[in-house]
Image: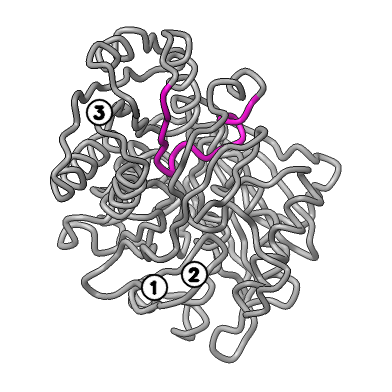
Amino acid sequence: MTRAWEAAAEMAAPAVGGWRLGRRGFLVAAAGGALAACGRETGDVRPPRRESGELVIGASLELTGVGQSLGVLQERALRITLDQLNADGIPVGNQRRRIRLIVQDNASDPGIAARQATELAARENVHALLGGCLAETSLAMIPVVQDQQVPFVSLASADGIALPLAQRTYVYKLAPDSRDVARALARLIRTQKHERVALLAGTGAHGDSGVQAVTRAFETLEQELVRVARLPGGAEPDLGAAVRRVLDREPDAVVVWATAPTSGAAARALRDAGYEGDIFFDAGAVAEETLSPDNTPAVEGAYVVHPISLSGSSLTNTTSAGLARRDFVFRYLRQYGSFSGFAPYASDALQLIANAARLGKSVDRGRLRAYLQNQVTEGIAGAYSFGPIRHGGMEAGSLGVFKVSRGAWSRIS
């Protein structure tokens, strides 16, 4: 499925040189700050012509389908960071390289994501891959990146993306680990003295991670979940049955562990069924759609555990990371009018790959992998600590607690 940049007037065909792109994708070419795109016949299997001074990165994002509310945010973040990095180029060895970014819409379909990963890695011969906002699309890409030995930075949050490490040697995950989010939620719920807590978990790997992590977190605090129910998937799922199951146990707090747009829909279903207690979200709920006018009455007063990027950056934070975060938020607001805390993941992924090329003085896939797994840095979304035995890099200390107040996320701790 093909998606053009919204600002079509900014596209400049000469920037793409000899590149041509498959019918399910589009090309973002950063040359002098311009964006470019064009089509390619599917029968053309010739190796792509590449400028000698390029770092080529492929991205498979959910620009349509059920994950659109997450994927579009990443597309926006990529625009901003691409322009910044290409302003001066990336110092790699004895030359400065520009980043050529190939972005494809996987339509939230794991099968399409896997095929795109194959095309990008084998046909387009990219140096690295990023993307997969949904756990299922990221998981579908992993066998390809392992086979092609191309570094892959995932934007999804299921724990199984980076584990088991022996089978994920080229895979890195930016989102926080489920256990860290679950522990923070459990502590928050305990401080508010809720005794009867239920869990509504989404379908798939993200929901599986949530069920396991939340159950363990509550066991550690010697507090039992009164009911665990799974939310159905699909574009327009009927959540009524799952909501009735948890409300039958009369909880005074409900944890909704799902990605947007399911998170907001679950909150609406709970309120429509008469539930008046507190609602707690995991980080997957943070997207513009969750705070849409249709959801606002249902999510008002709800809590979420999310990386600190959700609150932007304080004017008093003058560290290099704080200044970078503030600059990113300013640019994002200027271009898109409102800021979403989920957006910086793609920005951090792009920066991490660029850093690996700079540190390794090469764009060789093996060297990029080696220098990715030895980065300890603070990005826009939060702090990362990769290592040979740790490919899930978001630090627990990067998490904060936020509450929906007057239709916006406000940090409370």
Q: Is residue 373 visible?
A: yes
On the image, the x and y values in percent for residue 277 come to 41, 24
Task: Name the one closer to the observer, 374 or 219.
Answer: 219
Q: Secondary structure at mark 3?
A: loop
The quadrant holding residue 408 is top right
Direction front: furthest residue:
193
Q: Amino acid at mark 3?
A: Arg
User: Could you give the CA–CA distance between mark 3 and mark 1, rounded to whole angstroms?
Assistant: 43 Å
Q: In the rendered view, would you say 202 is above or below 390?
A: above
Q: Which residues are magenta?
A: 277-292
Q: In the rendered view, would you say 15 is above or below 364?
A: above
The residue that disc 1 covers is: 372
Q: Amino acid at mark 2?
A: Leu
Residue 196's tag is 3
Compared across the picture, whether 1 is left or right of 141 comes to: right
Q: Secondary structure at mark 1?
A: helix
Compared across the picture, whether 178 is left or right of 86 comes to: left
Compared across the picture, whether 88 is left or right of 410 comes to: right
State the residue at coordinates (39%, 17%): 234
Q: Which label lies toward us, 3 or 2?
A: 3
Q: In the rendered view, would you say 172 is above or below 389?
A: above
Task: Name the one closer to the observer, 410 or 139.
Answer: 410
State the residue at coordinates (16%, 56%): 164
Q: Amino acid at mark 1?
A: Leu
Residue 280 on the magenta span: yes
Q: Residues within 10 Å of mark 1 (few under 14, many from 20)?
A: many
